Amino acid sequence: MPIEFQYLDNGLGFGFTATGNFLGKELIEAATNAYQSEEILRKNKYGIIDYSPVEKFDVATSDIEAVAELCMEASKISPDRLIAVVAHSNISFGYSRMWEMLSDATNWERMVFRVKSDAEE
C-alpha cells in the first residue's frame, strides 16, 4: 500500500502521505484504520493529508463519499479537529474539495491546499 501514516505530537495529530498509484480502496482502508480507536480519536486534534507524491490518483466518487461518511462518524467522537489536505494535481484537488464539501456536517475545520508548506501553517 503506497501510504505512510504516522501519529504526530504524541497522538495529537497525524500525518498521511500517499505515493505512487493511489487507489480508492486504499483511501477507505486508511480512513477506517485511522478512525478505529475511540481513545485515539478523542486525543487527536489535527491531521495533514498529503497527496502531492501521488503519480496516479485512481479514486471514484463513491470512495470519497465512503470516506466522508467515516469522517462524519468519527466527528461524533472527535468534534474539534483541523484537517489540511495537500493536493497539487487537478484530480486530487477536485476530489479533496468534494470530500471537504461532503464532510461539511462534521464541523471540522478542513482546507485543501496546493502546496504542503501552506497546509502546515
Image (cartoon, rainbow, N blue to C red):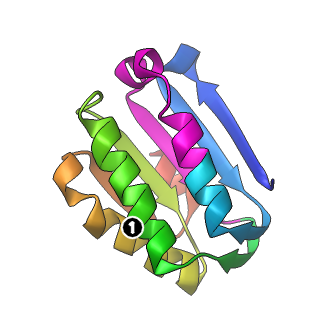
Which quadrant holds residue 78? top left
Position of residue 6 measured from the top left corner of the image (x, y, whole percent): 67, 32
In screen coordinates, is 20 left or right of 61? right
Position of residue 79 measured from the top left corner of the image (x, y, whole percent): 23, 33
Which quadrant holds residue 25? bottom right
10 falls in the magenta region: no
**Residue that numbered label 1 is attached to:** 65
Position of residue 23 measured from the top left corner of the image (x, y, whole percent): 69, 69
Q: Residue at x 60, y 80 (%)?
A: 89
Does residue 51 show up?
no
Which span is picked out in magenta? 30-52
Query: Relative to 112, is 75 above or below?
Result: above
Quarter holding the C terminus? top left
Q: Amino acid at mark 1?
A: Glu
Q: Residues within 10 Å of mark 1 (few under 14, many from 20)?
A: some
Q: Residue at x 22, y 47 (%)?
A: 106
Position of residue 20 measured from the top left corner of the image (x, y, whole percent): 82, 67
How many numbered marks are there? Answer: 1
